């Protein structure tokens, strides 16, 4: 029974033993803010760390701990920390490395609020950042300097679906001793494992594929070193305090059980939808890493198990044509977020990336006629029919 289990089995069982909890098949939800000590001396030992055990739920909670152990195993790390949002996880890991005057090297595109956080850090504290395409070792090295405290990347990049070769980045970073953080939200641990490619930390907005049901806001940070993660638990997580509620951790554990089955269908539906869009006369372009003509296709083959459940595309025309198309949709919902059972569409230029200055947005390839689809789990023919009637002919 001690033999290491396969990914799909770990999604369902890892980190939980029913014998420890009255034989309950599912982990109980420990809605308790604090934990009692049987003696004052025991309290002292819990605080010094001489004795294992819970103290106060901002420092750890049994339901949350099951989720953390499961996520650590799924991402091939030593430890994980759960947060109340993806952004709380991003903030905690960045604050772990920041010092006044430091520099963060970033992929050319990052999630809108990550962009906002970097801007805030710059304006308030003088922490600088550089956005780099990171397509070659030279390009990465050119952007590193003495104050570079970490490298932060997203791949695939939202919504332009550009990929970054994680191994290329981590090989360069190792030469300079700089830690690499990868936002793996778009892939989930089922499709890509950045720690295996040399990264030091992985973050997820668990709001997306890990939940899978559009009912939780949460984040996870996974690290390859247990002691280092314990430091983050006892500093930036504990003292900034963006922790997850036990009920939300339980919802994520429930979502995780079907991650593999859901992802397979997301991938299959997206493949069919991308194929359909590619040939439609009113579609100017599709942006999808599973397209063999995509310049990023070789990186996808190298580091992802499959091209994922997201596709961006551009209609003929501009903002008006894009918005009219969206308004004609009936089954597909207009909403930000992704990874849910429902197919969702959004307009990056006026929604998720509205905060990005328009010239920067254009240089990233986010045009006004571009839309991003998070392909859901409905029957693909119903999704296609909805798109078809909205595109018109
Ligand atoms: C949604 C998202 C985040 C932020 O996560 P929240 O759970 O909304 O705080 C970060 N990165 C990516 C890629 C995302 O899609």
Image: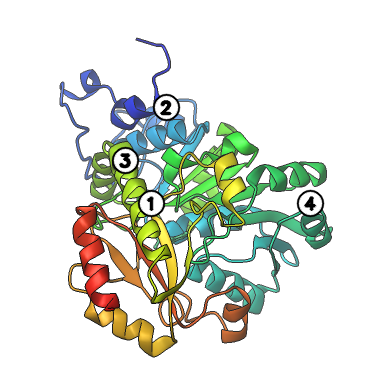
What numbered label is drawn on residue 137? Answer: 4
The first of marks 2 and 4 along the sequence is 2
Category of crowding for the residue at label 1, using alpha-carbon neighbours closer than 10 angstroms: few (below 14), some (14–19), many (at least 20): many
Disc 1 to disc 3, how far (Cα)?
18 Å
Per the model, the C-alpha gap separating discs 4 and 1 is 31 Å
Give the mark nearer the N terminus: 4 vs 3.
Answer: 4
Residue tagged by mark 2? 52
Q: Confirm if mark 1 falls within 8 A of ligand 1.
A: no
Q: Position of residue 387 (x, y in %)?
A: 27, 69
In the image: residue 173, left or right of residue 202: right
Residue 21 falls in which quadrant of the image?
Answer: top left
User: Which residue is label 1 attached to?
Assistant: 271
Residue at point 79%, 51% (across, down): 137
Q: Residues within 10 Å of mark 3 (few under 14, many from 20)?
A: many
Describe the element under mark 2 as helix, strand or loop. Answer: loop
Mark nearest the camera among 2 and 1 is: 1
Q: Position of residue 122 (x, y in %)?
A: 66, 74
Looking at marks 4 and 1 on the same chain, the residue that comes earlier in the sequence is marked by 4
Query: In the figure, is residue 129 to the left or right of 351?
Result: right
Q: Earlier in the sequence, mark 2 or mark 1?
A: 2
Determine if the C-beta at disc 4 is less than 8 A from ligand 1. no
* Residue identifier under label 3: 259
Measure the C-alpha gap from mark 4 to mark 3.
34 Å
**Disc nearest the viewer among 1 and 3:** 1
Q: Which circle marks residue 210 in the picture?
A: none
Mark 4 vs 3: CB contact within 8 A: no
In the displayed structure, would residue 387 be above or below residue 46? Answer: below
Instruction: Find residue 362 and report its horizontal and vertical position in percent.
Output: 59, 80
Mark 3 CB within 8 Å of ligand 1: no
């Amino acid at each position: 029974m001690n033999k290491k289990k396969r990914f799909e089995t770990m999604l369902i069982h890892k980190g939980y033993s029913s014998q420890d909890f009255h034989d309950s098949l599912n982990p109980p939800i420990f809605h308790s803010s604090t934990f009692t000590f049987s003696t004052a001396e025991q309290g002292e030992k819990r605080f010094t760390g001489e004795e294992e055990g819970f103290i106060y739920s901002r420092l750890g909670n049994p339901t949350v701990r099951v989720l953390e152990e499961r996520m650590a195993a799924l991402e091939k790390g030593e430890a994980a920390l759960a947060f109340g949002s993806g952004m709380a996880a991003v903030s905690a890991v960045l604050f772990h490395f920041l010092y006044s005057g430091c520099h963060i090297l970033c992929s050319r595109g990052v999630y809108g609020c990550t962009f906002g956080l970097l801007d805030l850090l710059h304006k308030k504290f003088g922490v600088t950042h550089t956005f780099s395409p990171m397509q070659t070792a030279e390009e990465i090295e050119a952007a590193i300097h003495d104050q570079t405290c970490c490298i932060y990347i997203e791949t695939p990049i939202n919504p332009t679906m550009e990929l970054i070769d994680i191994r290329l980045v981590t090989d360069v970073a190792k030469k300079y001793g700089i830690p690499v953080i990868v936002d793996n939200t778009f892939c989930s641990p089922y499709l890509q494992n950045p720690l295996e490619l040399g990264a030091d930390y992985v973050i997820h907005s668990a709001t997306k594929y890990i939940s899978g049901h559009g009912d939780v806001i949460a984040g996870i940070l996974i690290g390859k070193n247990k002691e280092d993660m314990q430091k983050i638990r006892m500093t930036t997580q504990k003292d900034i305090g963006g922790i997850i509620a036990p009920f939300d951790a339980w919802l994520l554990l429930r979502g995780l059980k079907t991650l593999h089955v859901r992802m397979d269908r997301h991938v299959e539906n997206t493949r069919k939808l991308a194929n359909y869009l590619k040939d439609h006369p009113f579609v100017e372009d599709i942006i999808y890493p599973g397209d063999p003509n995509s310049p990023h296709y070789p990186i996808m083959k190298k580091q992802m198990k499959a091209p994922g459940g997201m596709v961006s595309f551009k209609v003929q025309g501009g903002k008006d044509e894009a918005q009219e198309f969206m308004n004609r949709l009936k089954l597909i919902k207009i909403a930000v977020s992704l990874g849910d059972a429902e197919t969702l569409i959004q307009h990056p230029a006026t929604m998720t990336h509205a905060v990005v200055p328009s010239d920067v947005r254009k240089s990233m390839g986010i045009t006004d006629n571009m839309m991003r689809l998070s392909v859901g789990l409905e029957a693909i023919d119903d999704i296609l029919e909805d798109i078809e009637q909205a595109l018109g002919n």
